[in-house]
């Protein structure tokens, strides 16, 4: 089983402004990868999804990649 990236790196709060970390959890088309694929816990997956959505709304991440 994969280790949760956020608990391994002692990250308590997933920040929407940290685009480099958020991009690790997006596939090449810009979709959020599942927690089964990334190994993130369910709690952190929900926080990750919210952070990605906030970043997309503010224009930091694209909604789709051409």
Image (tube, rainbow, N blue to C red):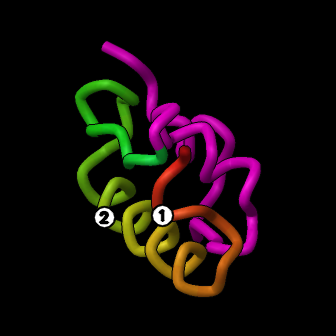
Q: Check residue 12 for magenta coloring.
A: yes
Q: Quadrant of the N terminus?
A: top left
Q: Residue 46 carries which label?
A: 2
Residue 49 position within the rendered picture, expressed as x and y whole percent measured from the top left: 38, 64
Residue 53 position within the rendered picture, expressed as x and y whole percent measured from the top left: 44, 74
- Relative to residue 49, is residue 58 drawn left or right? right
Residue 66 position within the rendered picture, expressed as x and y whole percent measured from the top left: 54, 44
Look at the image and give the residue range highlighted in magenta: 1-29
Q: Is mark 2 on a helix, strand or loop?
A: helix
Could you tell me how far apart the alpha carbons at marks 1 and 2 are, in whole angstroms?
A: 18 Å
* Residue extending farthest bottom: 58
Q: Earlier in the sequence, mark 1 or mark 2?
A: 2
For disc 1, the marked residue is 63
Residue 55 position within the rendered picture, expressed as x and y whole percent measured from the top left: 59, 75
Density class for disc 1 (Cα within 10 Å; few <14, some 14-19, many ≥20) is some
Q: Which of 47 and 65 is in front in this view?
A: 65
Density class for disc 2 (Cα within 10 Å; few <14, some 14-19, many ≥20) is few
Answer above or below: position of 5 versus 37: below
- Residue at image position (64%, 56%) is 11
């Amino acid at each position: 089983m994969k280790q949760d990236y956020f608990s391994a790196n002692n990250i308590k709060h997933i920040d929407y402004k940290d685009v480099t970390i958020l991009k690790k959890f997006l596939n090449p088309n810009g979709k959020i990868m599942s927690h089964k694929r990334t190994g993130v816990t369910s709690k952190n997956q929900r926080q990750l999804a919210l952070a990605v959505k906030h970043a997309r709304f503010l224009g930091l991440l694209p909604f789709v990649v051409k």
